[in-house]
Each structure stands twice: as C-alpha cells, then as structure tokens.
Image: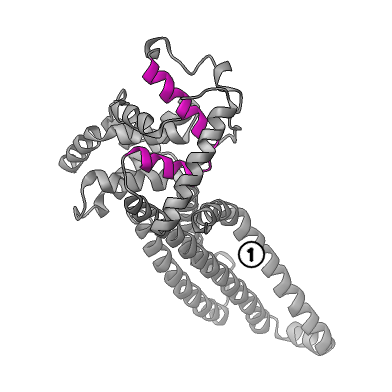
Amino acid sequence: MERIETIFLSLINQHKGIIHKVSKMYMNDVEDQRDLFQEIVMQLWKAYPTFKGNSKFSTWMYRVALNTALIYFKKDNRKVDKTPLDENVDIVDVNESDAREEKLAYLYKAVQQLNPVEKALIFLFLENQSHREIAENLGISEINARVKLNRTKEKLQLIIKKNGYEF
Amino acid sequence: MNFDEIKSEWNAEDGEKTSVSENMLKIKQARTPVDTIRNKMKHEFFYQVLVLILMAFVPYLFNFSAHSTTAYLAFYAVTCGFSAYYFFKFYRFYKNSYDMSMDSRKNILWFYYEMKLNIELYKALTYIIAFIGIAFLATLLFIEKFYVFNKIVSKLSTFYLLVNCFVTILFIGVITELWAWYYYGKHLKKVKKIVDELDSEV
C-alpha cells in the first residue's frame, strides 16, 4: 500500500503543474483554488487503481483533473468577481510583478467569466493540444471543438478588452 | 490579444509552488455533485443495513404469535431479497464511478444516466418495501384480529377501499419522489447542466 502511495505521489509531483493550472483556471479565489487542487489530487488518488497504463500518466491526469474541475462546485456560491481587471489590486503579487506574471494574472481573471466547458477548451488549447486532441479529451467532434474554441477565444478577447486590458 | 504569445507565457509558467504530500490523500472533501451523491449513497446504505438488522428483532420486541412471526419472516425475507438486489446494483455503480479517465462527455454522461437509473431503482425499492409493509400489516390484522379485519372489510364499500388504496399509493409516491429529488435530484441537475453545455451543437 505504501509503495503505491509513494509511486503515485512521485508521479503527481512530476506533473503537479497541470493541477495548479486547472485550479487557477476554474477558481478565482486562492482558497477555492487550494480546495480544487486538493479535490483533484483526491480524485486522482481514488481513480489511480483504474489507471491501466495504456496511456501516458499525464494524459490520464489531464482527463481526471478536467473532469473533476468541470463538475466542481464551491460550497458557498460566491459570485464571479466581475470588477474591472485594473481595479483588482490583489491580482499582481509583489513577487510576481513582471510582465509575464501580470499578463497571466489578467488571463486567469478573465477566464473566470467563461463557463466550465469554455474554460476546458481554453485550458487544453493553452496546453498546446490540437483540435483533434481537444475533441478527444472532451468527447466532442473535431469540428465542434474547432468552432467552440474559436468562439471561446473571441469571447475571451471581448472580456479582456471590456475590462480595459489589451495584450 | 495574441494567443500565441499567451500560450508561450502559459507554458513558461511553473505553477509548482505546493508539493503534494501524503496528508493530501487523506483529506475527505465532497465538493462535486458526484462525490456528494456517492457520500449520500454510502450513508444510506449503512442506514438501510442497520434498519434491516433491527427489523429482524421486530417479532420478539412486539411479542408476535407463532403464525404472525412466520408471516413476518416471509415478508422480511422478500424485503431482504429486494434490498440485496438494489445494494448489489448500487455497489457496482459506486465502484465504477471512480473511473474518471473517459473523455469528459462520456464520463459525465455515464454518471448522469447511471445515477438516473439508480434513482429509479431506489424509488422502485421504496415502493416495493412500502407495499410489503402495508401487505404485512393487513396480514397481521387478518391473523391476530380476524373478526375486526372481517368487520372492517364487510363494512367498507369497494369504492371506499379503492379510493383508500389510491390515496395511499399517491402518498407513498409523492413522499418517494420528493425524497429522491431532495436527496439526489438537485445534484444531478448540476451534472446535467454540464452535459448540456458539452452537447450543444455549434
């Protein structure tokens, strides 16, 4: 039992960046991000006995992480913060003040206004997945994935523009 | 907005500040409708097993006669049989629900329809047990108070008996439906919303 735990933890720690990114995509609040992170780890651990090794661990992890995030709901239905991005002083941490971090912080903020499926589309796109891979992961047709992704990108651009930040 | 630029910056982000520890595997959270339903099913399973065990002592607690005890045990055996069938189905669903490695649509759709099926089974079991209970009470009255039973049946018109049966069925039906909705339905609705979003054609 302990050996399985050790192997699992080592695999998870190699790919934990995926879980961090999914958590930040789906949750705005730091506490909620931490909760979702833990929830994904828990789901991965519970589902680990079903991992047969037919695919890469990271591929399996993408699916479980996304499937968990898609149906994850916060306990206290706090509303999505729709205040203009430049008014939110918490976005840019003192230690994360370089341009790249700032840009990503604005991106994370903007995606909060997308629905769970749109978030999944953008996440997979940013993870360099092709239309075919996105379609396979979400279980939709390739054409559907392409059109949905383009619409989501347009929506995201509009949100960012509306909130006064262009990049 | 340049998506290619954002993509390269996204990929350059390490995002690995927290490391996953052993303790994280022991935290019990239930923040997904799937988990909530799973937890509720587990609790309900234990309550039902407890009730079934307690039910075995009913004839001794209420000092049933030998005839009534025999009748009770027959009804009890049928109840246990139906419950065992439901528990088996429920257990299979419960175990399989941990596999989340299918594509999102398949995974969520699988859970949605399996859960719907289990809710229907759950309702059917409730109806069956309720009717077994009513049938046993009528049998008990027939065995223990035959004259009273006979008197009641002879005094009541067929129409009144039919209306009574209808009202009883309606009452059991409403309680079962409301309970299933309150306990499972609202969580299932959340799952359905995601299925609809994935299914929406462009």
Q: In which quarter of the image is residue A97?
A: top left
Left or right: residue A14 versus residue B197 is left
The color scheme shown is one colour
Relative height, residue A149 to residue A54 (above, below): above
The one of B37 and B194 positioned closer to us in this rendering? B194
Relative height, residue A147 to residue B81 (above, below): above
Q: Mark 1 is on which residue type? A: Thr
Residue at x 78% of width, y 87% of height: B153
Secondary structure category for the residue under label 1: helix
Residue at x 37% of width, y 11% of height: A95
- The residue stretch that appears in magenta: A99-127
The one of B133 and A54 positioned closer to us in this rendering? A54
Residue B34 image point, x, y percent: 46, 51
Q: Which chain is home to disc 1?
A: B
**In magenta segment, residue A121:** yes
Q: Mark 1 points at which residue?
A: B176
The one of A99 and B130 positioned closer to us in this rendering? A99
Residue A103 image point, x, y percent: 43, 22
